[in-house]
Image (cartoon, rainbow, N blue to C red):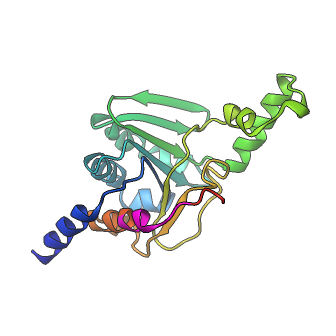
Amino acid sequence: MIHRYYERKLKRELKNLPHSVCFMITDDDIAGAPMKPEKVAGWCIKFGISEIIFHIDTDSVESILKYIDTLKEISKIAELTLCYEDKTEVLGSGAHVSVAIGKSGREEIINAIKKMAADGINPEDVSENTIESYLNFKFEPDLVIKTGGSHLTDFLIWQSVYSELFFSDVNWKEFRRVDLLRALRDYQLRKRRYGK
């Protein structure tokens, strides 16, 4: 009862929600709670967040492939873009949810530079906008949430330079709606400076 009251109190306090939220999780997180991304995406959508990203950090994409069908369940509640290996699948409709498995921000930037070189772009003409146009992932999350207290990965290393970071000691499997609400409350209390 007290738990539900606290959730309602947190929801009432939310006035300035992020447009885009990225969750940094691991292959162990997915193995321990394969249905959790769909549940968390549902919470985000109910709170009015229109762009949700899950990055699954793994050294072996194959270890996640057995959970692909479970991850595809997200398409029942949203438009899902699923990126793994060299594949990109788009399923469903609604709010935008992306799942990137084993993707590296450094590799993405290296690939962008290679594509620019292949297209014959003069180095003098390269700007931030040029680089951004060659990146695979176009979103710039307002808030990045890392559960379990472990370190961040280099995913979205370019795009998240001005993102607000929230580290939760709660493991992904135990991550609750109230933990998401706490992260959103923390976000709205911050004064975003965008590098200034």
Quadrant into which the N terminus falls: bottom left
The picture places residue 89, in percent across and down from the top left corner, at 48, 29
Residue 115, image quadrant: top right
The picture places residue 78, in percent across and down from the top left corner, at 33, 36
Q: Which one is nearer the viewer's eye here, 43 or 163?
A: 163
Q: Which one is nearer the viewer's eye here, 11 or 39?
A: 11
For residue 122, above or below residue 163: above
Residue extent of the magenta highlight:
185-192
Q: Residue at x 78, y 37 (%)?
A: 127
Q: Which residue is drawn at 13% across and 77% down?
A: 2
Extreme-left residue of the structure = 1
Q: Which residue is drawn at 33% across and 54% down?
A: 40
Extreme-top residue of the structure = 119
Q: How many marks?
A: 0
Q: Does the magenta stretch include residue 189?
A: yes
Q: Which one is nearer the viewer's eye here, 160 or 101?
A: 160
In this picture, residue 154 sits left or right of residue 144: right
The picture places residue 93, in percent across and down from the top left corner, at 33, 28
